[in-house]
Image (cartoon, rainbow, N blue to C red):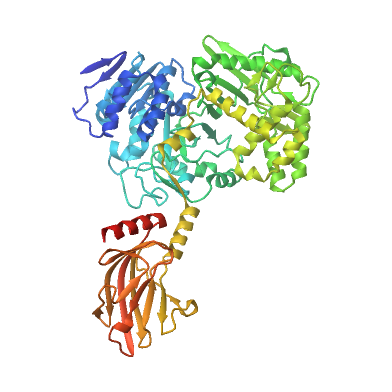
Amino acid sequence: MREEIGKVVLDYSKYSGEDLYCDGDVEDELLKIARERSAAEYAGLIEKRRNWPILYHLSSLRENIVEWVPMDKSHRVLEVGSGCGAITGALARKAGSVTCVELSRKRSCINAYRHSECDNVTIHVGNFKDIEPDLPKDFDYICLIGVFEYGQSYIGGETPFEDFLKILMPHLAKGGRILIAIENKYGLKYFAGCREDHLGTWFSGIENYADGGGVRTFSRKGLEKIFANCGVKESHFYYPYPDYKFMTTLYSDDHQPGRGELSNNLRNFDRDRLLLFDERNAFDGIAEDGLFPVFSNSLLAVVGEDFDIEYVKYSNERAPEYAIRTEISRNPEPGNSKDPDAGPGTASDTGSCVRKYPVGKDAVEHIREMETAYRNLTERYRGGNLEINRCRLKEEGEQVHIEFEFVKGTPLSALLDKCLERNDQEGFLRLFEEYLERIGYNSEYPAADYDLTFSNILVDGERWTLIDYEWTFGKQVETRELAFRAIYCYLLEDEKRNKLNLDSILRVLKITEEEAEEFREQERGFQAFVSGKRMVMGQIWELIGNKALSLQEFLEKYWEAERLKRVQIYEDRGNGYHEEESYLVSGAYVDEKTVELELKVDREVRMLRIDPAFYSCAVKIRELTFNDEPIPLNRKHMFLNGKVAKPSTFIFPTEDPGMNILLEKLPREEENTLFVRMEVALVPLSIAEEAAHAARRLL
């Protein structure tokens, strides 16, 4: 049985007739969206709906994990577990044909409606084990994106992951590759307080899934063991950041992150998390010690030959006309530059180069304008002390990209950071003033790079090179405005930089606080211009509303609650209560709300006061006895600075609650025992006051 939705073919010949799993009503909503809305509307729907499933299934950032892979129309792709089609579209645009396997019919229909204009997509609906024998054996790529961890469910048996891979490998053409994107069980986010993605529990992967569950993620070493058991001769690893689901940056063993790069860590879109430590600071140390492959949140394993690409960065949380991909490649493309100043090519002595590609046709002109920017900036700074990184534009049919020289050096931002770490404000100012002198050269020339941030300048001895000039305008811009923006962005990137004496910078730039605020507002307008007023992922995280619960804040609240949940006893022997003669009862709270007291009281005590907490509260007395005899809860035997809500329940609208028990009205012996068991709930003072007022009206 076959069905066509647009140009997409769905094959039901192995479908059991029943979807064995479903995410509930959200899939019906996704199906309706796929039928009635275009992909261009998805970003707005994500912002409007503000929930995890809609974001997860419809965000265009999901495609980043495969969009960079150098496929072309000669390649055949198998996508196992294609779901609702989050990456199917990217594969279809790049490859000659895409064969999908998906267990759920409803999800397959969502996929088909989303990509109904693709004439190179076939979706096989049913169990992978039933479909697999009929699949061809000439795929150039097999994609397991968020799928391999379910191998036990797909395959079963004692070695499901090895068996899964062994089943797939014969379906590769010669030189073909398997791509596996999966969470790293030892990803730093799990140590820092994120729950395991599939089970929703804390530390499950770190604890080696001691409590079981049908999902398994792996470390790099764990995957390498599986590959070795399957006879894999060659494999390579990449490291998607923040994770493979919404990757913005892809690192490799040849290009790992540097200090300050890994700052986008609040990614708990699906549920609340703990925040046990600052992941950015931890990642800085991990990067310095070369341990990023161990603690990367996700892994992308390539079974087969490696790629020439060693680094990828996406800037596609933007308006479509500015969405680009930047990559560092080991092998520059041959060919001469159109620019005589650029020489015969742009390769550095490392053999690497930087390329920028449009993500979609809308951004092609933005790429082309970078060559114009290079020419204009080269002319402006000719004779000055700021070099402009060489580039060349390459156009082959509809394919357009621009190639830059890979420049060695230390980012100026890193040099400034070192000054702050040493608390060397004077050294910082010297570097900043040199920056001003270099970027301000020939300032009357009608060309200015608005993005002259410190991280875009590499310093190698006396050589300062501007490596990125994407936002170059054909007009004059005041040097102090460019420099203020650089400082503003620098401070926003890392709160540790707040130790900088900003007043001294403003004095150097001769900028008043009023002008500074005008420049800040201008920057906000620029960001809105670049993003097309679309929300970035950080804003969407805030909209969805899942919390990151700080361990320090949690402990402070806990300790504060513990401080407030103390029981203090006063005894009146005829001279009233005296603070210096009172005492605290250790261990009075036997659990979060229950207080149990057994107090020894001599005959001389006429009245005894119990303060159940150091905060406004509600108290329900479960048991109150004196020498095993119940004490009636009435005004004859006790009074309090609260209000009676019910015969045994009291509201204390004060931060000094107290219950006074008149022992002199009770039969007393030389040694007496007072026992009380009560439940105590701390209540904000304003609420306690309202409750007490209501109780007074009722009584």
Please tell me which residue lies in front, 186 or 502: 502
Can residue 342 be seen here? no
Query: Looking at the picture, does residue 199 appear above or below residue 531?
Result: below
Which residue is painted at 25% across and 30% down in the image?
Answer: 127
Above or below, 638 against 252 in this view is below
Q: Extreme right residue here? A: 383
Foreground pick, 577 / 251? 577
Q: Is residue 70 left or right of residue 341?
A: left
Is 497 positioned to the left or the right of 186 in the image?
Answer: right
- Against 684, is 181 above or below? above
Quarter containing the N terminus: top left
Q: Going 37% across and 36% down the picture, which residue do you hit?
A: 148
Q: Quadrant of the C terminus?
A: bottom left
Q: Is 198 on the left or on the right of 647, as rendered?
A: right
Residue 344 position in % (x across, y down): 69, 15
Residue 580 placement, left or right of 659: right
Give the quarter of the image for residue 646. bottom left
Foreground residue among 610 and 109: 610
When the figure is inspected, residue 277 is found, relative to residue 198, above or below; the finding is below
Q: Position of residue 552 (x, y in %)?
A: 50, 54
| Residue at the limit of the structure toward the bottom, as seen here | 670
Q: Position of residue 600 (x, y in %)?
A: 35, 83
What is the tally of numbered marks visible in this picture? 0
